[in-house]
Image: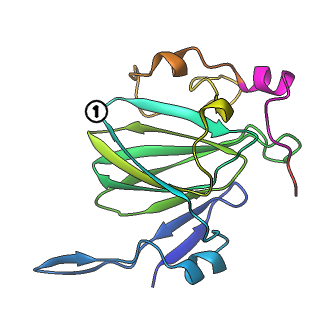
Amino acid sequence: MNVFRPEPLPELVVIEPAVHSDDRGFLFESWHRDRYRAAGIPGTFVQDVHSFSRAGVLRGLHFQHPDAQGKLVRVTRGTVFDVATDVRRGSPTFGRWWGVELSETNRRQLWIPIGFAHGFVALEEAEVEYRCTAFYTPEHARSIAWNDPEIGVEWPVVDPLVSATDERAPSLAELEHHNLLPEHRG
């Protein structure tokens, strides 16, 4: 049976799968609506996304507002350092981040709830899959500077390769100033 481990930021959950291995290979449950729902992960996914990143590529920090997405993330090849940042105005953990290594070896999943920005850096070539609770809508896509000193993510790379969009992303304070962040509903 999978183990659902709550993490320091509210509503974040790491799923440690029960992997059944033998000389033929392995098998594990990567989704079970009722078990995941009991752990606080909704069962309504509308879109799956699969990405490939070369070693040293950093993607993020991304979120959507107002058409917000929750994401269930896992790595099918390679290793990434995956990060979630609370961007809900009024939240007691606003601006705090938390990270975990996801890999094809540990087979962990990370549930990133609505109201959190998501990013990762590929520690080696990696393929990442995530299930989303809302469709990607370009007009609602938001980015926060991956190196925003107010957030202070401790990325395990020195000089990551980032997209032009991520390089120009505003700080969390700028987004808050322009009222481009979701409200905490706790």
Q: Write the residue at 65% across / 69% down.
A: 42
Q: Is residue 117 above or below residue 145?
A: below
Look at the image and give the residue range highlighted in magenta: 172-183
The residue to which callout 1 is attached is: 54
Name the quarter where the N terminus is drawn.
Answer: bottom left
Q: Quadrant of residue 146?
A: top right
Q: Kindly give the residue lying farthest to the left in the view shown.
A: 23
Q: Residue at x 85, y 49 (%)?
A: 184
Look at the numbered disc 1 and give the secondary structure of its residue.
Answer: loop
Horizontally, is 103 left or right of 174 in the view? left
Q: Is residue 28 left or right of residue 14?
A: left
Q: Is 71 in front, or is 79?
A: 71
Q: Position of residue 162 (x, y in %)?
A: 44, 22
Q: Is residue 154 visible?
A: no
Residue 143 horizontal/vertical position (percent): 62, 28
Please tell me how crowded label 1 is: few (under 14), some (14-19), or many (20+) other residues with Cα within 10 Å. Answer: some
Q: Amino acid at mark 1?
A: Arg
